[in-house]
Each structure stands twice: as C-alpha cells, then as structure tokens.
Amino acid sequence: MNQPGQVGLDGRSSHDANNNHHGAGGRPKLEHLQSHFSHIAPHLKAHLTDREANPILSTSEPTSGYLGPLSHAFINAYETGSRMGLGMPVRVTLSTTESSLVVLQSAPSDHQPDASVARQAPSSSILSTDSGPDTSKMLVSTVIAPAGELAEARVAIWAIEDVARRLQTSLEK
C-alpha cells in the first residue's frame, strides 16, 4: 500500500484513493470491489450471494434469471455432499458439452477442514440422518467464464472467496 502522499499506479495520491474507494475503517466499498473484478476479468461474471440468492457483489446484472437457481443448486449439492459423508464441500465446477461456459462455485469458510480431514472415508451409511452443515450464514461465490478461461476463473473464485471470508469475519464482530 502507498504511504500517505504517494502517488499510486492510477496517478492519484493514496489519500485520494482511500477516500474514493474505502468506507469507514479503510474497508473497500462493494462498488469498488465490483469495479475491480470487472476491470481485472472483463470476460468473467463474478457473483457473491447469501443463502437466499440475494446479491451482495455482482459484476453483471444481479437480477438475471440464472443467479438464483445456480446459488440454490450449489447449496443443494453442498448439503447433499455433506450428508453423504463426503466431507465439507469446497468447490463445484460445472461444464457441459453444449456450452462454451464453465461455472465455478464455492462457499468460503474459515472453518473448512484441512485436506486430510476431507479425505476421510465416508461412514458405513451412504446418507447420514444428520441434517448436514449449518448453511444459514453461507455465502455463495460464483464465477461464470468462457471455458477457455478456466485458469482465470479459478483465480477469480479465490479472490471472491477472500472477499466473502472478510465479509463474514466483519459481520461476526
């Protein structure tokens, strides 16, 4: 980060940049984050929604018809995978033969188990009677990208996961 009075890459002083792009406490405003994602990955559609598919951050029209069903489909896959004893789902990737698009989704959490826990053998029962993880505060990250830009989509989903974790942390305070 620039020291006070220094000029950043955009030609503005760090004081001006902080006043234009950050809210109280120096936290980035959501409008700035949307603009940032749109700028670094113009061909990708990035979304962050709550469990009810209410948009929190979106680089495209958040009222578009596919955002809600995609978020709900991810939550269903997340809950089913958990009930099957597969461990806590981390990410879902959807690609088809009919489309030139790929969809990556995740539910970032600071409480995700490490890889060794996630690889444990499932219990003897295929479906557990446990209701699965608490998804009431879940945030769903979604990236829709051209299939040829899968690497960029992965980087974008990691960035959105980071934003979601920070948002969850700030809401818990």
Image: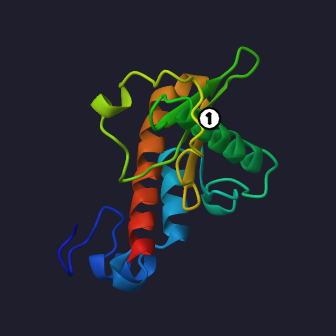
Outermost residue to the left: 3
Residue marked by disc 1 = 80
Amino acid type for the residue under numbered disc 1: Thr
Q: Nearer the viewer, residue 109 or 167?
A: 109
The image quarter containing residue 45 is top right
Residue 147 horizontal side relative to residue 2, left or right? right
Question: How many numbered circles are shown?
Answer: 1
Q: Secondary structure at mark 1?
A: helix
> Who's the residue at 59% across and 60% down the image?
136
Who is closer to the viewer here, 61 or 157?
157
- Horizontally, residue 33 falls left or right of residue 3, namely right
User: In this rendering, is residue 157 above or below 152?
Assistant: below
Residue 63 image point, x, y percent: 78, 58
Q: If the image is split into quadrants, where does the C terminus sit?
A: bottom left
Q: Residue furthest top?
A: 97
Residue 50 position by quadrant: bottom right
On screen, residue 151 above or below 17: above
Residue 132 x, y percent position in the rendering = 56, 44
10 Å neighbourhood of mark 1: few (<14), some, or many (≥20)? some
Q: Nearer the viewer, residue 135 or 23?
A: 135
Residue located at (72% from left, 57% from top): 62
Picture layout, residue 162 above or below residue 112: below
Residue located 41% across and 73% down the image: 172
